Image (cartoon, rainbow, N blue to C red):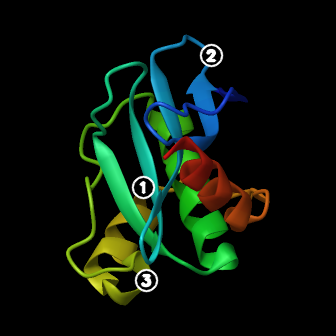
């Protein structure tokens, strides 16, 4: 399965959004008070099967976003993918990092995201 760039979902505050080519699964960045989350779920559902805390550092978030994209493109579903980390942000949860790294298909291409502050500005404008 491939993911394609899609319009931001301002209603659900999901930015830098990707949608699977079959139109069933979406993923993107969700700003929170102290950072950003990478979320994925079924399009239009507003509920997310994967909700990973990425912290507030751009490079760590790009890595996490890329890992989620890689896993979903290879699997095409959410089965056996950890829904979230126990310790936040994700890189402080070694068990979570080990579990998601086991699911990554090789090679991992790291996605370069637009500057994160732009997503936070969109969120604030929507409020």
Query: Which residue lies at the image location 44% right of the left edge and 78% below the top edge?
Result: 34
Q: Are marks 2 and 3 in contact (CB under 8 Å)?
A: no
Query: Which residue lies at the image location 51% right of the left edge and 56% below the top edge?
Result: 104
Count the numbered circles shown. 3
Please say if 90 is above or below 94. above
State the residue position of label 3.
91
Dot label at residue 21 = 2
For the residue labelled by badge 2, is the local secondary structure a helix, a strand or a loop? loop
Q: Is residue 41 left or right of residue 126?
A: left
Residue 118 x, y percent position in the rendering: 73, 58
Residue 106 shows in the view = no
Query: Which residue lies at the image location 68% right of the left edge and 26% below the top edge?
Result: 6
Instruction: For marks 3 and 1, give the CA distance.
Output: 16 Å
Query: Which residue lies at the image location 50% right of the left edge and 30% below the top edge?
Result: 26
Instruction: For marks 2 and 3, give the CA distance.
Output: 30 Å
Dot label at residue 103 = 1
Residue 91 x, y percent position in the rendering: 43, 83
Is residue 29 or residue 94 the one in the foreground? Answer: 29
For the residue labelled by badge 3, is the local secondary structure a helix, a strand or a loop? helix
Is residue 35 or residue 126 the one in the foreground? Answer: 126
Q: Is residue 88 left or right of residue 58?
A: left
């Amino acid at each position: 399965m491939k993911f394609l760039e899609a319009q931001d979902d301002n209603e659900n505050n999901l930015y830098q959004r990707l949608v699977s080519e079959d139109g069933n699964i979406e993923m993107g960045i969700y700003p929170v008070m102290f950072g950003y989350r990478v979320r994925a779920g079924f399009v239009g559902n507003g509920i997310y099967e994967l909700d990973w805390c990425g912290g507030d550092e751009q490079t760590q978030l790009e890595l996490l976003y890329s890992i989620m994209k890689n896993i979903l493109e290879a699997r095409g579903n959410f089965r056996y993918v950890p829904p979230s980390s126990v310790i936040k942000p994700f890189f402080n949860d070694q068990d979570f990092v080990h579990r998601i790294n086991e699911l990554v298909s090789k090679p991992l291409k790291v996605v370069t995201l637009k500057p994160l502050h732009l997503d936070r500005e969109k969120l604030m404008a929507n409020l």
